[in-house]
């Protein structure tokens, strides 16, 4: 997506890849979380200048980088704010590729401590040789243990998987 690549290029030039990404995600949350803001986008009572003032004010109040404020105004001017979710996803993918970052999806039966997640991130960074962002989730059906997915690789250390292996072993012994 050209908007995502354009703002990533600007962010890279200024050494602002992470802050711009955070601001884009913040803008998306702001947009999704405000029915008033969504209605303003298409309401005929709000002209281009009014929408620009609103977006500029919100961006300034949130402390967004100038590039993000400009992008939001541009999207609003062109009535393209509906692409914001895709733009943020494209930016994140391109930024991750540029910085060599991978995401690890960690699912456990109960919430994991920050210390555990930090140690897991360190281990995964050592194994992958890349910077790792850990996204933690809870799934009580796992009973216990942890399931970690990094890219296409799945590490299933859940109690549910272990019980399933025991069950298969028992069934194969009876055949």
Image: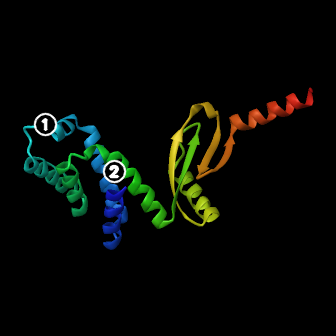
Q: Looking at the rendering, which quadrant does residue 94 occupy?
A: bottom left
Residue 14 in the image: above or below residue 33? below
Q: 93 left or right of 38?
A: right
43, 153: nearer the viewer: 43
The numbered disc on residue 108 is: none
Q: State the residue in front, 82 or 157.
A: 82
Residue 155 lies, in percent from the top left, at: 67, 48
What color scheme is it? rainbow
Residue, disc 1: 43
Locate the N terminus by quadrant: bottom left
**Residue 46 spot, x, y in % from top left:** 9, 41
| Label annotation for residue 25 | 2
Residue 157 in picture, x, y percent from top left: 68, 44
Secondary structure at numbered mark 2: helix
Q: Residue at x 37, y 48 (%)?
A: 86
Inter-mark Cα distance, 1 to 2: 24 Å
Q: Residue at x 25, y 58 (%)?
A: 68
């Amino acid at each position: 997506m050209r908007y995502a690549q354009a703002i990533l290029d600007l962010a890279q030039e200024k050494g602002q890849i992470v802050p711009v990404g955070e601001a884009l995600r913040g803008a998306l949350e702001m947009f999704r979380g405000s029915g008033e803001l969504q209605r303003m986008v298409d309401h005929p009572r709000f002209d281009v200048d009014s929408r620009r003032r609103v977006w500029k004010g919100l961006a300034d109040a949130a402390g967004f980088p100038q590039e993000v404020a400009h992008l939001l105004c541009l999207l609003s001017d062109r009535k393209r704010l509906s692409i914001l979710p895709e733009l943020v996803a494209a930016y994140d993918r391109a930024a991750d590729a540029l910085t060599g970052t991978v995401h690890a999806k960690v699912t456990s039966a109960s919430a994991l401590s920050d210390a555990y997640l930090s140690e897991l991130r360190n281990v995964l960074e050592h194994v992958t040789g890349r910077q790792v962002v850990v996204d933690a989730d809870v799934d009580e059906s796992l009973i216990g243990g942890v399931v970690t997915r990094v890219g296409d690789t799945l590490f299933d250390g859940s109690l549910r998987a272990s019980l399933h292996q025991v069950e298969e072993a028992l069934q194969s012994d009876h055949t």
